[in-house]
Amino acid sequence: MLIILPLPLGPLQTNCYLIADPTPGEATVIDPADEADAILTEAERRGWRIAQIWITHPHFDHLGALPDLVSRLEPAPLIALHPDDRLLYDAGGGAALFGFSLPPLPLPTLDLVHGQTLSLGRFRFEVRHTPGHTPGHCVFYCKEAAACFCGDLIFQTSVGRTDLPGGDWETLENSIREQIFSLPDETRLFAGHGPQTTVGDEKMFN
């Protein structure tokens, strides 16, 4: 069973997800929003080893814990990011636009590609490129767990904003229809902000 631990962290209460296959004790962090101590404490409490960090998109509120987290993990974790978002990543995730700043970010070590498969223990995740909120935004879909980690693409009865640099409404809408609404209705959606929902509910109410 895939274990999914949502951690709302940072000034915007961004959802960081600590996910694990408990049998080998392997864990992945999706969007390390803030408070590395909180993330590490939860992993250590359960005896999990964090080996990977997957970034749906590099807005600053999804990256706050990344430098501290990486510096405290041995061996260093894999850091996955879509190359179309590298410019935003290198610019500190747009933090300056909101009066925040980030320390220097570690270099990504894996370029995400649409259709790529990522592995966590026994579980496989399909990378789906879903631009619109940012040019390189990606979601991570695990068919076995009926779960999709969708960043700021779609929320419960809402969608990601498109008024920030690199955003585009028509592109976002197309990403949702093609990459989210094409999933089975029972698929759970774990968004970057707010509560969990499902594909079926968002088709009906969003």
Image: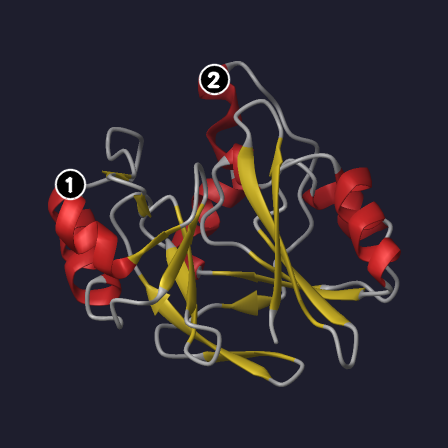
- Mark 2 vs 1, N-terminal side: 2
Q: Residue at x 27, y 33 (%)?
A: 161
Secondary element at tag 2: helix
* Residue labelled with disc 2: 98
Disc 2 crowd rating (10 Å Cα; few below 14, some 14-19, many 20+) is: few
The type of colouring in the image is secondary structure
Residue 8 lies left or right of residue 182; in this view the side is: right
Q: Is 3 on the left-hand or right-hand side of 114?
A: right
Residue at left 70%, top 39%?
A: 65
Q: Is residue 146 above or below residue 169?
A: below
The residue closer to the viewer here, 94 or 206, is 206
Q: Quadrant of the C terminus?
A: top left
167 shown above or below 55: above
| Res. 176 image quadrant | bottom left
Q: Position of residue 159 (x, y in %)?
A: 26, 40
Amino acid type indicated by mark 2: Phe
- Kindly indicate whether the residue at mark 1 contacts the one at mark 2 (C-beta within 8 angstroms): no
Q: Is residue 39 above or below residue 185?
A: above
Residue 129 rendering spot, x and y as whole percentages = 33, 64
| 46 and 75: which is toward the camera | 46
- Give the residue pinned by disc 1: 169
Q: Position of residue 26 (x, y in %)?
A: 75, 73
Single out the residue that lies furthest toward the bottom.
122
Q: Is residue 187 visible?
A: yes
Amino acid at the residue labelled 1: Trp
Question: In the figure, is residue 81 to the left or right of 189?
Answer: right
17 versus 68 height, above or below = below
Can residue 92 be seen at all in this image of the molecule?
no
Residue 34 placement (x, y as % from top left): 67, 35
In the foreground, 134 or 143: 143
